[in-house]
Amino acid sequence: TNGTLIGECLLERSVTDAHVNAYVLSDRVLLILMNAHKDARELNFKVNLAPWIKSGSKYEIYSYDQYGKLRTSQTINSNKWTGKTSTLGSYDLEIVELIMK
């Protein structure tokens, strides 16, 4: 995998009962979230891109399920973002790609 592994450092605070890792390149981040709780649930999280990728005026965000199917896409105008996964079963994953534009 390309990029620098920064673990949960992208998050403003940890997500309870979840495993979170991120890989950073100069203009994008790959965020991997896994529900480590026994029950299915959504994961709510806040990211701060400022320390990790170049400052941009816009960021495109793509969320994928654990099979690589695109779930959502959006554009934001801030380096801070509050996100939420789909409902994840126990040990299910969601992958989020954040790209500076």
Image: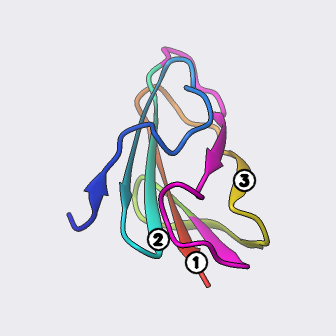
Q: Which residue is mark 3?
A: 81
Pick the front one: 79 or 36: 79
Q: Secondary structure at mark 2?
A: strand
Looking at the rendered image, the quarter that the N terminus falls into is bottom left
Looking at the rendered image, the quarter that the C terminus falls into is bottom right
Please give the name of the residue rendered at 27% of the width and 57% of the height, measured from the top-left corner.
4
Amino acid type at mark 3: Trp
Estimate the x, y position of residue 68 in percent, counting from the top left. Answer: 42, 65
Q: Counting other residues with Cα less than 10 Å from the Cα at mark 1, is it few (<14), some (14-19), or many (20 or more)?
A: many
Estimate the x, y position of residue 22 in percent, counting from the top left. Answer: 40, 50
The quadrant where residue 46 appears: top right
Q: Which residue is mark 1?
A: 100
Q: Secondary structure at mark 1?
A: strand
Q: Which residue is mark 2?
A: 28
Amino acid type at mark 1: Met
The mark that comes first in sequence, 2 or 3, is 2
Please give the name of the residue rendered at 62% of the width and 50% of the height, measured from the top-left corner.
48
Q: Magenta stretch: dominant SS? A: loop
Pick the front one: 3 or 30: 3
Please give the name of the residue rendered at 54% of the width and 74% of the height, measured from the top-left corner.
99
Mark 1–mark 3 Cα distance, whole angstroms, equals: 13 Å
Q: Is residue 52 visible from the viewing direction of this image?
A: yes
Residue 23 drawn above or below residue 37:
below
Mark 2–mark 3 Cα distance, whole angstroms, equals: 14 Å
Does the magenta run of residues contain 43?
A: yes
Q: Counting other residues with Cα less than 10 Å from the Cα at mark 2, is it few (<14), some (14-19), or many (20 or more)?
A: many
Amino acid type at mark 2: Arg
Q: Are marks 1 and 2 in contact (CB under 8 Å)?
A: yes
Q: Which residues are magenta?
A: 37-62
**Side of 42 relative to 3 (left or right):** right
Q: How is the image coloured?
A: rainbow
